[in-house]
Amino acid sequence: MKKIFKHLIIDVDGVMTTGHFIYSSKGKMYKIFGPDDNDALSLLKKYIQIDFITGDKKGFAISKKRIVDDMNYKLYLVSTTKRLEWLSKKYDLNKLIYIGDGIFDHYVMKNVGYSIAPQNADNLAKKSAQYITKRNGGERAVAEACLHILKKFFEEYNPNQKLEKKIKFSGNWTV
């Protein structure tokens, strides 16, 4: 019997992004987000609530633009050292899937129902994850993780079937 999961929490920096922060003399200016992740999340969101978390206070506006404004998901600013405590107050950890990459994410990964790390995650995170993507953060790792979650816990994505019209994909635009 498949385990029931209610929430997917994704760390932004290093998972949705390459983890690089591009600075100028004015401060943090850019983050590099990868392709296809939003579309794969669109396939998954009918099965599970998806929220995002970041510990990057200075780059929060950049993450908010992509995650909240462009993709329409919730984004929470939570210290990387206080995530487990924060998550345990807000979610049932046994019904939570967590995708993280950072040096302190192993604390969360050891206490949730299922955890995933991108290929270029910190070694402690990878040792604590139940699944490690073949791809790096910001390079379709989230898309790969979504397809893995669909197959393992819900309904495997079938590329031979037409896409559901009611799902909003990033490529839904007209000429």
Image (spheres, rainbow, N blue to C red):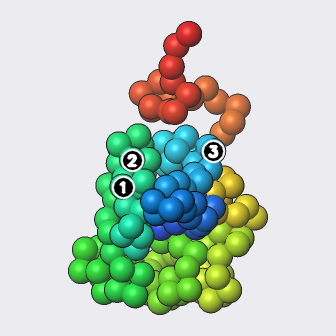
The residue positioned farthest toward the right in the image shown: 134
Q: Quadrant of residue 145?
A: bottom right
The reply, left or right, for residue 19 in relation to residue 78 is: right
Relative to 93, residue 140 above or below: above
The reply, left or right, for residue 88 in relation to residue 130 is: left
Which residue is disc 1 drawn over?
61
Which residue is disc 3 drawn over?
35
- Residue at 64 percent of width and 82 percent of height: 122
Relative to 1, residue 129 above or below: below
**In the image, residue 114 lies at what x, y percent?**
51, 75
Q: Residue flagged by tag 1: what amino acid is it? A: Ala
Q: Foreground residue, 26 or 4? A: 26
Which residue is disc 2 drawn over?
65
Relative to 67, residue 1 above or below: below
**In the image, residue 134 lies at what x, y percent?**
75, 64
SS at badge 3: loop
Q: Residue flagged by tag 3: what amino acid is it? A: Pro
Q: Foreground residue, 72 or 163? A: 72
Callout 3–callout 1 Cβ contact below 8 Å:
no
Callout 3–callout 2 Cβ contact below 8 Å:
no
Relative to 172, residue 76 above or below: below
